[in-house]
Structures are given as C-alpha cells and as structure tokens.
Amino acid sequence: MRGGEKVLEALCEIFPQADVYSLVVDPDSISDKITSHNIRSSFVQKIPGALKHYQSLLPLYPIALEQFDLSGYDLVISSESGPAKGVLTRPETCHICYCHTPMRYLWDMYHDYRRDTGWLKRLAMVPLAHYLRQWDLASASRVDYFVANSRHVARRISKHYRRNSEVIHPPVATGEFGLADEQGDFYLMVGQLVKYKRPDLAVEAFSRLGKPLVVIGEGEELGRLKGLAGPSVKFLGRQPFSVIKDHYARCRAFIFPGEEDFGITPVEAQASGRPVIAFARGGALETVVDGETGFFFAEPTVESLNEAILKFETLADSFDPRRIREHSLAFDKSVFNEKIRSFIDARVAEHFEKFRGAGSK
C-alpha cells in the first residue's frame, strides 16, 4: 500500500462500481477498499513465484496487458509508473492515464540502472530496454488524456512522450496524522531502502555528525547501510502505522535525501507538524516551502546535507508546527478526490463530444 496503491484506493472510492485489472495481485497486501472490487489479474499471476519476482517478468508485461478485454467499458483509467497504459481500448472509450512517472529504468535513469546491475543482466538489458522503450512510446499514444502526479513528472511526460498532462498531486491522508505534545531528539527517515532514494547520504551524514537518526523501512540497501552506519544511526526495519505515525510526530525533522517523482512521506511528516530537510530536486520542490516548512540542500552529497542539518539546528525554533501542518492540507485526499473527479468528468464529456462529432462527418 504505497503511493500507487493509495491512488488506486481513492479511485475505487470514487468509482465503487469499477472493475480492477492488474498484472499481479496479492490480496493480503492491499486494502479492503480495493479487494472489495472485482479484481482480474493477468496470466503473469499464474507463473510460479510471480508475486515475489514480478519485476523480473517485465518483458511479459506488454503481452499480458494487451490480453485484457476492455471492450465493454466507456471509461478506462490506468494508474501506472510503467506499462499499464498499454491496454487496448475501443475508439469510443475514453482512456485517462494517471502517470506516477514514465519508467525511469527505460528513460532518464537508464544508464544509472544499467551501470549498477550485474554483467549478465547488463548484457540482456540493452536489447530488452530498446524493445520496451519502443513499446512504451507506442503505448503512450493509446492514452486520450494524461494526468501527472507532479510538475516534475509532467515535464518528463512531455520530454519522453511529447504529450501534455494535467497535474493533480496524489492523495495523502493528512487527517491520520497529528501534532505531538513533546518532541524527541532524533531525526527520521522513512521509506524503501533502495539506491535511487539515496538513503546512504542520510546514514553517512548523521554518522559523521554523530547525531541521532532513526531509519524505518526495508530494502535491498539495508545491509550496505548498516555497514556505513555509526552508533548514532538506528534501524527499525518495517514498522506498523502506529509506530511510524508516532515517530513522524516526535522527530526533530524528517530527512528526504533522494529525488522523487512526488514523495508522499515528506507530506505525511508535514501533516505531523514536522519540518523536512530535502534534496532540492523533483517533487519535494512542490511540497516543501524552503524556510517555512523545511530546508533544501542543493547537492546530492554528504557535505551539502550536513550543511543543511547544521543550518536547521540554528533555526529549528523558528518553525511553527501548526503552520507546517496547515500547508500539508493542500495535498489532502479530499483535494485529490475533488480535482480528479472534476478532471475525469470534463474529459469524458469532451471525448464523447469529439467521438460523436467525428462519427457525423
């Protein structure tokens, strides 16, 4: 139940009668609001080990998606950070794509992913990525209207697909977070511990400064990060929401060291009244107000982050928790629901009008 699933959950609430199609489904890991819908998975689901190793089955995704029969629907909404928009629809069907990001590993971060993988995967990646890139670009033409989850993603959609998009930020359940009566003395980082999120910057920075950092989350980088960490860094692994919520509310500040397409965790931290120290790239530029709800650091280096941490400590008392929380409400789920519903209603009407007009000629 990460950002993409939260968007799906909100769409399921807006369209309670909707069917859900997915490449693979793990009912135990998604909410009751989603599982209450009629969910249909692809043939990928039947491959042994698909739920655990679904990312390795990427070459099968185009074929699997194109087997979904969506001919009975007037409206199709694809929510994706990759291939979901590749479904086939009738000319009269309105297809709206909520795009979390064009596939990073095929486009702007392709060389980073290729450089960081093993030689065998690297060898296979060259022809495979070329094929998938062509399919991804072709599948973008199947979409009638794009919605981007941030201005950062809208620019990437324009660059890679040459398409315009409407920006509607994803839903954040700000009402589930609140202010704490007392603050702790620790800083906090929450999320998947994967390379592109740059958790190593935070671990190294706080190890050098000897200041307390609590890390909540799991991922492929966990072992390496523990090797980098000094005694001031504490790893809690995966935690239930109650523990995460408590740490959000009591931390001195939230650390967000990577470049994200949007980034829900900084908004959740601000909904808890806590300032954010973030890398000045990507979606954080749209959710954090420098000097009011947090600080930015300019370069993806330990030195730059340390400078921001020390600057924050000299001005920490100037941050108003209530003002920070008030800012977060602009990203509340209710705002998303209103904007996405209004957008869909308008685009569906526009699409049907165009279709009727084209049919009369």
Image (cartoon, rainbow, N blue to C red):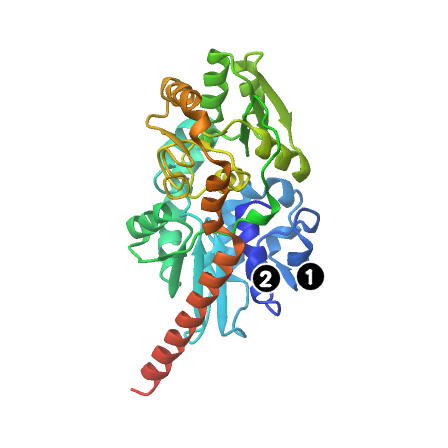
The residue lying at 40 percent from left, 58 percent from top is 147
Give the quarter of the figure containing the C terminus.
bottom left
Q: Is residue 269 left or right of residue 355?
A: right
Q: Is residue 179 left or right of residue 355?
A: right
Name which quarter of the figure residue 240 lies in.
top right
Badge 1 crowding class, 10 Å Cα cut-off, few under 14, some 14 to 19, many 20 or more, is few
The residue lying at 59 percent from left, 24 percent from top is 184
Circle 2: residue type: Cys
Q: Are marks 1 and 2 in contact (CB under 8 Å)?
A: yes
Q: Secondary structure at mark 2?
A: helix
Label 2, on which residue?
12
The residue lying at 36 percent from left, 35 percent from top is 290
The x, y position of residue 311, in whole percent, is 38, 21
The x, y position of residue 217, in whole percent, is 59, 31
Q: Is residue 291 left or right of residue 216?
A: left
Q: Report the front residue among 182 and 48.
A: 182
Badge 2 crowding class, 10 Å Cα cut-off, few under 14, some 14 to 19, many 20 or more, is some
Circle 1: residue type: Ser
* Image height of 24 relative to 68, above or below: above
The residue lying at 57 percent from left, 67 percent from top is 15
Q: Earlier in the sequence, mark 1 or mark 2?
A: 2
Label 1, on which residue?
36
